[in-house]
Amino acid sequence: KITFDFSGSDVGTTHFLTFAATFGACVGAVFAFMRKEIPVNAGTASVVQVIAKKGTIVNANFPKPVALGLTDGLDVVANLALRTLSLIDKHRAVAYGGGSHCAFELRFSSGAIFYDRAHPGSGATSSTAGVSGQSLWWRARLNTSIEEIERRYPLRIESTGYRAKSGGAGAISGGDGMAKTYRLLEPAEFLWNFTDSVDKPLGQSGGKSAAGPEILVLRDGEAPSKKEKLKAQGSLKLQKGDQIWILAGGGGGYGEAKSSS
């Protein structure tokens, strides 16, 4: 049996998880820690016990908003649980993965609503590099092609790829976060949220921390140097031709990098 006791948790301010989400994050952390193919069923989940007081951040009461908790909050709890488990066996330690999916929504003047996110990189382990654009804890099915998105919505996806060097350095590097650039073809209201943590995704055993997430806006006709860095949550009126830059965080590195000398 493994018990995760969150009795000291407070009510929270931005991230609110349901008990089921907290439980799932802890079960996922245990399975990741074991590094074996383990079936997910009532029997395997029964070895995990979660203590989370009702009304706290990890067992929120209605009407607390759980949207950010069920995306970014789940990653935060799972990363914390996995790092705690590494105290049992340091050979299974994993660096922190990026803790935010940079979820956003565009409400166009024509009435169309577009939703997307950018996945972070995963943390490195003692034997494997982190994976770019892949959270350990989230499996999205939003795989619509760029062509289909551009056919349905008044926007153009100008670039999509990985954010170079956003993963933490080390003997084994963390994965890079995703990077996406959008250009609006009609006015829209832009709403976004991401976890702007005080600490960047932490490395493990001497590995370097990764870059945190960023969302930038470049107004039509402005020089690239005029990009506006947005705060963690908010809404903004955008015009035709404006660009949005979504930069997900990377995963932490593992171990101290060898000296080049």
Image: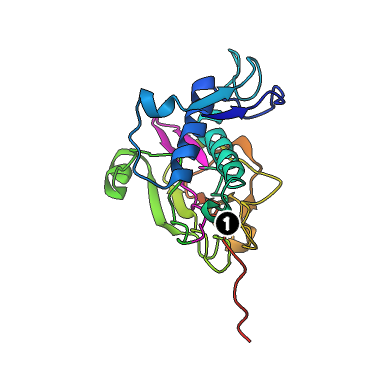
Q: What's the residue at 59%, 65% (across, down)?
A: 255
Under mark 1, the amino acid is: Gly
Q: How is the image coloured?
A: rainbow
Choose between 204 and 252: the one closer to the eye: 204
Q: Which residue is mark 1?
A: 252
Horizontal and vertical percent for residue 89? 56, 49
- Queried whether the magenta region covers residue 183, the answer comes back as no
Horizontal and vertical percent for residue 100? 55, 43
Position of 154 relative to 58 (above/below): below
Left or right relative to 196: residue 154: left
Horizontal and vertical percent for residue 88? 59, 45
Q: Secondary structure at mark 1?
A: loop
Look at the image and tell me in which quarter the C terminus lies. bottom right
What is the chief secondary structure element of the magenta stretch? loop
Choose between 136 and 162: the one closer to the eye: 136
Q: Which residues are magenta?
A: 101-126
Considering every residue shown, the one lying at the far top of the view is 62
Left or right relative to 208: residue 137: left
Position of 83 relative to 48 (above/below): below
Q: What's the residue at 35%, 31% (across, down)?
A: 40
Choose between 223 and 178: the one closer to the eye: 178
Q: Residues within 10 Å of mark 1 (few under 14, many from 20)?
A: many
The answer to whether residue 67 is seen in the rendering is no
Horizontal and vertical percent for residue 146? 31, 49
Considering every residue shown, the one lying at the far bottom of the view is 261
